[in-house]
Image (cartoon, rainbow, N blue to C red):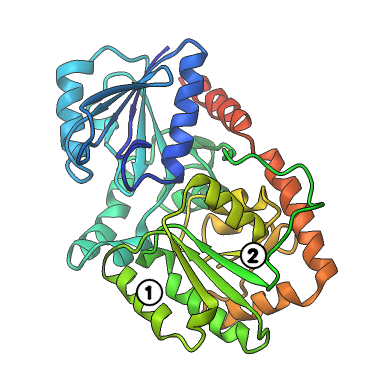
Amino acid sequence: MKILWMTWKDLNHPQAGGAELINEEIAKRLAKGGHEVILLTSNFEGGKAKEERDGYKIVRVGSRYTVYWHAYRFYKKNFVGWADFVIDEMNTIPFFCKLYVQERNVLLAYQLCREIWFYQIKFPLSLIGYLLEPLYLRLLRDRQVLTESESTKKDMQRYGFTQENIQVFSVGISTQPIQTLNGIAKYSKPTLLSLGSIRAMKRTLDQIVAFELAKKNIPNLQLIIAGSFIGAYGESVRRRIAESEYSQDITYLGIVSEHQKTEVMKRSHFILVTSVKEGWGLIVTEANSQGTPAIVYDVDGLRDSVKQGETGLISSKNTPKALAAAITEGLRNENEYERLRETALQWSRQLTLDRCYSEFTKILFAIR
């Protein structure tokens, strides 16, 4: 088959994340299976207009915000009648393929934006996006949808999408799970890990406050933060680290390599994830693969990637105080902690990229 995949970022984009990893692992496997795949996406500083990688092609047009208009124009000029299938990937905003694409097309929705508008976009654009989202979702509610979690499925049903039209596929991880917990040395002191881009929707400040509260009960507790500071929020996190009464027990690693990322996940006791919402929470299951359970907020995506009391802990409320209580609970009983580690590791082993590809393509190719 010939597949045109419209997406706002590719894996080489400086702000690429979990969705881009999943996309291109699927695209790579599609190409290996004999399908012709083209990703039509946004360009970035230093990016090539055209590129081929792992058997599939990438065409970059416009910027992160103008890619939707440029993709429409590029499709009209170059791709009408070419594809057997067009994937309209909605990361915040869809490409509205329904309105102009002649070929069969499907909506790929990792998550809905809704609450995130006010964390990521400045007013009044945040308010405009918040108000427009329900309108364009209702316009697309007759689409067949692929998504990565039951949370997003339920979210979309609130806007008129039918249960029958939404299919969920499992999300795989690229991180190789460890063979056994035996011989894996954790840090000598109980250690919390904050990993990923440091921006408003990730609520990193909540993690620092929770750490400070939990440290009153666990005096030798320490926190490791890895990732890049983004915008004014990132700077506020930088200041908070410096001004914390426990700053000597907070280590900032900056941007880490894949090897460093795996090592710090392996040696930490818990990873903290406090996003406003996620499609899934790939970092959670990546950490699980290294024998590290997660403590998360009770939000879309994270309540899917964490099985409460089995592979990690879900905070009773989305507040630093409740998160601190979960941290204290998680580190109180060593036997219970080791059970969480083992279950988290076993859970991660089920979430392979091959399974992700198999489920994704089974759904995709069944759509008529």
Q: Is 144 on the left-hand or right-hand side of 268?
A: left
Q: Amino acid at mark 1?
A: Val
Judging by the rendered image, the residue that carries numbered circle 2 is 270
Q: Amino acid at mark 2?
A: Phe
Nearer the observer, 248 or 210: 248
Q: Is residue 186 above or below residue 356?
A: below
Give the mark, 1 or 2, whose residue is nearer the N terminus: 1
Please tell me whether mark 1 sits on a helix, a strand or a loop: helix
Count of numbered labels shown in the rendering: 2
Q: Is 72 on the left-hand or right-hand side of 297?
A: left
Please tell me whether mark 2 sits on a helix, a strand or a loop: strand
- Position of the N terminus, as image quadrant, is top left
Q: Quadrant of residue 89?
A: top left
Nearer the observer, 63 or 90: 63
| Residue under the image location 41 percent in, 56 percent down | 255
Residue 298 appears in the figure: no
Q: Position of residue 243 (x, y in %)?
A: 40, 85
Residue 277 appears in the figure: yes
| Residue under the image location 58 percent in, 49 percent down | 262
Nearer the observer, 320 or 335: 335
Q: Is 335 on the left-hand or right-hand side of 210?
A: right
- Outermost residue, right side: 335
Q: Position of residue 319 (x, y in %)?
A: 52, 78
Q: Position of residue 120 (x, y in %)?
A: 30, 62
| Residue under the image location 36 percent in, 64 percent down | 199
Q: Position of residue 364 (x, y in %)?
A: 49, 25
- Position of the C terminus, as image quadrant, is top left
Per the rendering, the mark at residue 99 is none
Judging by the rendered image, the residue that carries numbered circle 1 is 237
